[in-house]
DNA sequence: GCAGTCCTTTACACAACCTTTACGTTGGCT
DNA sequence: AGCCAACGTAAAGGTTGTGTAAAGGACTGC
């Protein structure tokens, strides 16, 4: 028998963001529960691997906090099995300095990691970063305007071309991706982390300057035709293409 | 997030693109259902081989997602039997690193493969790539202008001849096909993958340089008569015949 | 068989590209 | 002011994709 799925309608705002935590440390999960509920998240905690895996696989959660040191089923195993079914974002919780787990975890498809002990504030910040990025990605999957204009910049995504004052820019594939992202979010700050993951396809590492170089090169190319059109830097936050009058 | 999603419009009144998924993993089919419906596709899932085969044979679907590991009837068997009746495009879903299934599948006429676990984003991208290519093929089967001119190049498809500054080029069948494709899409980037599938009739493999050689030979032949008329390379993207003034 | 034609593979050179390095500058902080 | 982390960018380094000659196969017609 053929099953046809109809899409459950998602009301904006009606649905809370649900977070699942898989960690055997009950006291810790209670602490985290308090903080996340204060921030308006729906929170669920389980203390065993298999149980957590089942819940995570249900795709009922927008994010999973996964402890690596778990009794019974190892956290990395949980992650590996989860990844067979779901791309639900996972934030790993590792013992301090456990470099190996961290690397393996990221390779298995974790979205971020956080070393224990962590401050609740930092946890919330990481969670927000992941969720914001997921939303960016989903936005990118939506059909997008094939052409748009920001000040003197004109984007033609069918031709993969960006023009400044009607002069086509000669951009590399990466430069094009970065500039397109900035244009599609003109007026918003785009963080370096987001740019790196979406355009370069890798997490931003400490002392990684390659994104800065791409921005530098894009600026140089734009400046050939228009000295006024500038990518703004917001120190510590990211980059911004100003929308509207200069 | 906005609830109302606009569909990527094809022709007015054209029916929706229907996709059939044959996979025993119910949770996975539900996840895929959500994503594809968000993208405006009509989606149907079945969990058994024979049932899927029947549906696929009905030609009611523009594309079939086919899991290789199926209980009852093996995915490769389904594919083989489907190919006796239909040329409906098939995207195989294989276990990671299952090289053998992949190769056999492509030989049996699958259009692409995707290793599990995959990200919904990647799945959508692959689907779009296949559908775009299918559209290109159908476009080619339509009656097309029997002659057209791009800069100094003149195509006479009745004679299967292409002239540069009125000098007929001596092209092999493959070279003619490639150049015709580029001319009919002058001004657009044509990916190496598309060129390979449409002109050479095979998927582009890693380290496969034969397309490069054909391009090289075509360039040489064109250059005999006109040094200015050039096939442009867009690194990592494909080739392009510039339309209009040089 | 053999020659001819065509497609593909191999091999090497090169160019484009991305990243890293290194050093200079800026801007927020105490 | 002085410090320090973040940023700008030129130059060097490493990687990858492309150009192309030449060799290797596959096929055809004689």
Image (cartoon, coloured by chain):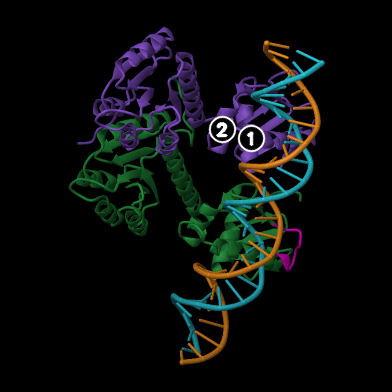
Chain colours: A purple, B green, C orange, D cyan
Please count the marks in the image. 2
Relative side of D12 to B176, left or right: right
For residue A23, what is the image quadrant? top left
Q: Report crowding for label 2: few under 14, some 14 to 19, many 20 or more residues within 10 A (C-alpha).
A: some
Q: Residue at x 67, y 27 (%)?
A: A149
* Residue toward you, B16 or B98: B98
The chain carrying label 1 is A
Instruction: State the CA–CA distance, disc 2 to disc 1.
Output: 9 Å
Query: Which numbered circle lies on residue A211?
Result: 1
Q: Position of residue B103 (x, y in %)?
A: 36, 57
Query: What residue is pinned by disc 2?
Result: A204
Relative side of A46 to B178, left or right: left
Q: From this viewpoint, which residue is outermost toward the top?
A: A38
The chain carrying label 2 is A
Q: Position of residue B143 (x, y in %)?
A: 52, 53
Q: Residue at x 50, y 61 (%)?
A: B200
Where B67 sits versus A214, above or below? below
Mark 1 falls on what kind of element? helix
Mark 2 falls on what kind of element? loop
Instruction: Tell me where the magenta segment starts and ends, as one range.
Output: B223-230
* Residue toward you, B140 or B84: B84
State yes or no: residue A89 in magenta.
no
């Amino acid at each position: 028998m053929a099953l046809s799925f109809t899409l459950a309608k998602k009301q904006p705002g009606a649905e809370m963001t649900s977070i699942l935590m898989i960690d055997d440390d009950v006291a810790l999960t209670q602490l985290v529960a308090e903080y996340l509920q204060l921030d308006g998240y729906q929170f669920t905690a389980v203390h065993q691997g298999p149980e957590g895996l089942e819940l995570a696989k249900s795709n009922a959660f927008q994010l999973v906090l996964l402890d690596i040191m778990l009794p019974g089923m190892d956290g990395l195993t949980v992650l590996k099995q989860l990844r067979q079914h779901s791309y639900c974002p996972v934030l790993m919780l590792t013992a301090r300095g456990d470099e190996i787990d961290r690397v393996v975890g990221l390779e298995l498809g974790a979205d971020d990691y956080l070393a224990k002990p962590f401050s609740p504030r930092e946890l919330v910040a990481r969670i927000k970063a992941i969720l914001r990025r997921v939303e960016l990605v989903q936005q990118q999957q939506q059909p997008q305007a094939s052409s748009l204009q920001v000040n003197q910049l004109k984007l033609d995504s069918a031709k993969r071309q960006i023009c400044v004052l009607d002069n086509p820019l000669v951009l590399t594939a990466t430069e094009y991706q970065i500039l397109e992202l900035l244009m599609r979010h003109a007026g918003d700050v785009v963080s370096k982390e987001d740019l790196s993951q979406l355009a370069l396809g890798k997490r931003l590492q400490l002392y990684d300057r390659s994104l800065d170089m791409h921005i530098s090169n894009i600026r140089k190319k734009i400046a050939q035709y228009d000295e006024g059109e500038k990518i703004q830097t917001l120190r510590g936050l990211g980059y911004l293409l100003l929308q509207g009058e200069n």
